[in-house]
Image (tube, helix red, strand yellow):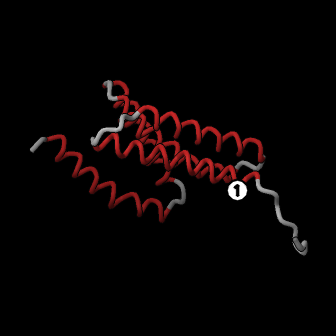
Amino acid sequence: MNVYLFIAIILGILVGITFPKIMEKYKYAGRISIMLLMAVSSLWYWKSGMIKSSYLFFEIFTWLSFDFVDYIEEKGIRALIAIVLIAIGTLGITLYEFEMTFIDILGILMSAGLALYGFIYLGFLVRPEEKEGRKV
């Protein structure tokens, strides 16, 4: 058994135990710490030359950071953020090859989900608001 795999399993168990407790006590501290973990992992894989794995962690980071869009009040900036999600998802689909490796399958699913989420959010954002009492 690989030593790094054993360390990764132990770290995964510790993260799985501690992050839900942190997220219960502090609202966004758990989310921000997971985002930092994803950003560091993305940079680590990028520096080691594994671009596909790095982009997968970057997509997870982008998905997690999309939760903070609720604090933005302008519709135009929200629409631009949704377009960025669509662009990142589309670029991810073109990056991965259609092989049966775990990273390729997970990357294609994550990229497609990210792009579809951006399209759906943009659709809900630009639909006309229905007025109360208006009959169609």
Residue 81 versus residue 129 in the image, above or below: above
* Viewer-closest of 7 and 120: 120
**Viewport quadrant of the C terminus:** bottom right
* Helix, strand or loop at mark 1: helix
The spot of residue 65 in percent (x, y) is 55, 46
* Left/right of residue 12 with respect to residue 77 in the rendered view: left
Q: Residue at x 52, y 40 (%)?
A: 89
Residue 65 falls left or right of residue 2: right
Badge 1: residue crowd in 10 Å (few <14, some 14–19, many ≥20): few
The answer to whether residue 16 is left or right of residue 64 is: left
Q: Position of residue 99 (x, y in %)?
A: 30, 38
Residue at image coords 78%, 46%: 74
Q: Quadrant of the N terminus?
A: top left
Q: Residue at x 29, y 44 (%)?
A: 102
Residue 54 x/y as whole percent: 39, 33
Task: From the top left corner, tell me how far across and down residue 95 is, in percent.
Answer: 43, 32
Q: Which residue in the rendered view is the most extreme toward the right?
A: 134
Frontmost residue, 60 versus 130 = 130
Q: Mark 1 sits on what residue?
A: 124
Q: Residue at x 18, y 40 (%)?
A: 4
Tell me how many marks there are: 1
